[in-house]
Amino acid sequence: MFSIGELSKRTNVKVPTIRYYEVMGLMPEAERTSGNQRRYDKAGLERLSFIRHARDLGFSIEAISSLIELQEHPDRSCEAATKIATSQLEGVRTKIKRLRTLEKELSRISKGCDGEGVSEDCYVLASLADHNLCDREH
Amino acid sequence: MFSIGELSKRTNVKVPTIRYYEVMGLMPEAERTSGNQRRYDKAGLERLSFIRHARDLGFSIEAISSLIELQEHPDRSCEAATKIATSQLEGVRTKIKRLRTLEKELSRISKGCDGEGVSEDCYVLASLADHNLCDREH
DNA sequence: CTTGAACCTCTAGCCACTAGAGACATTACA
DNA sequence: TGTAATGTCTCTAGTGGCTAGAGGTTCAAG
């Protein structure tokens, strides 16, 4: 049995965040000492590691909620869990695509100003002011 | 002179968002009709297009604030504006890197379950539970 | 038994909006 | 000119995923 601070150290999740996960229903309500402090065991540690890992991979609290429910009702869980993971993957790929477009545009804009000294007409500002100067949609 | 709704249509920025930009100091306080409704002219339209475009490129409200200030004091604005754009570009590149790592990991995890039928041990859930199953850090 | 660190609950703040309530203004048409 | 529909006004509160701080209690070491 260990305290919330111990749990925090072992998982690299901050103390208030652990309490937040409890409020959100991701962490079960912890056992308490006579003085009302939370105590955790191995199960708590594993649960929090799971949450942490999933958050690191960008899963929302809601998605993690579903995944935890699936863990607890293992019939058919695999299919459903894969679906959640796949949709997460799709989201990530979409974000990457979008960011790549932004990257191209921003690097074009940033480079515009650099060397040559038409100093009273900033290319960065001009580009932002006029979408027509852009190479592509974003 | 046109209304906030007109401006909204022309820029694809929602009406409450325009008001929000005014509160945040990105949009100047608009002229008002005798009945207290906002009226805009070409300058307002251009300003909002600028903001919209910058937001689309992921600039924060704060960064846009700085860019607008630079627009209004054009001495040395180019250098400073380029700095802001470059830092934005850096941020975007960092995000892309991170997301690529996630993508690899998620696609590995999602594929784990698909075909073969070890149905009582879901690979998605197992992977999330145990970071050691991961290929790399994230 | 005392001290100091860790813990408790509660509230508010972050960003960039978005939604909704309830009241007033404008506009199109009869 | 009357009226009805639509647009606009301000204000407050909610979103997600935490984070910070106040003010108080409990625990563990010496």
Image (cartoon, coloured by chain):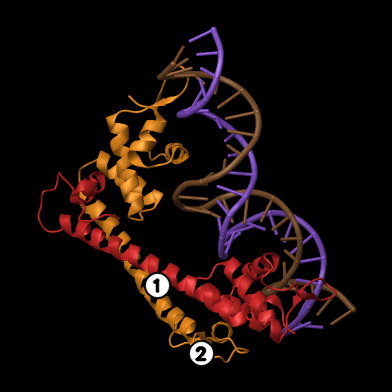
Chain colours: A orange, B red, C purple, D brown
What residue appears at the point 34 percent right and 52 percent down from the top-left corner? A56
Q: How many marks?
A: 2
Give the spatial CA distance, label 1 vs label 2. 19 Å
Apparent side of residue C25 relative to residue B40 in the rendered image (left or right):
right
Find residue B3 and report its image quarter: bottom right
Amino acid type at circle 1 is: Leu
Which residue is label 2 attached to? A133
Q: Give the position of the N terminus of chain B as an image quadrant.
A: bottom right
Q: Nearer the viewer, residue B57 or B9?
A: B57
Disc 2 crowd, CA 10 A, few/some/many (<14, 14-19, 20+): few
Q: Give the position of the C terminus of chain B as an image quadrant.
A: bottom left
Residue B120 visible at all:
yes
Amino acid type at circle 2 is: Leu
Q: Secondary structure at mark 1?
A: helix
**Mark 2, chain letter?**
A
What residue appears at the point 47 percent right and 39 percent down from the top-left corner? A16
Disc 1 crowd, CA 10 A, few/some/many (<14, 14-19, 20+): many
Disc sitting over residue B113 in the figure: none
**Mark 1, chain letter?**
A
Where residue B53 appears, as percent x and y from the top left, is 54, 78
Which residue is label 1 attached to? A99
Circle nearer the N terminus (1, 2):
1
What residue appears at the point 27 percent right and 44 percent down from the top-left corner? A70
Verify CB contact (< 8 Å) between mark 1 and mark 2. no
Apparent side of residue C28 relative to residue C24 in the rendered image (left or right):
left
Q: Secondary structure at mark 2?
A: helix
Apparent side of residue B82 relative to residue A47 in the rendered image (left or right):
right
Residue A138 visible at all:
no
Q: Nearer the viewer, residue C1 or A63?
A: C1
What residue appears at the point 72 percent right and 74 percent down from the top-left corner? B28
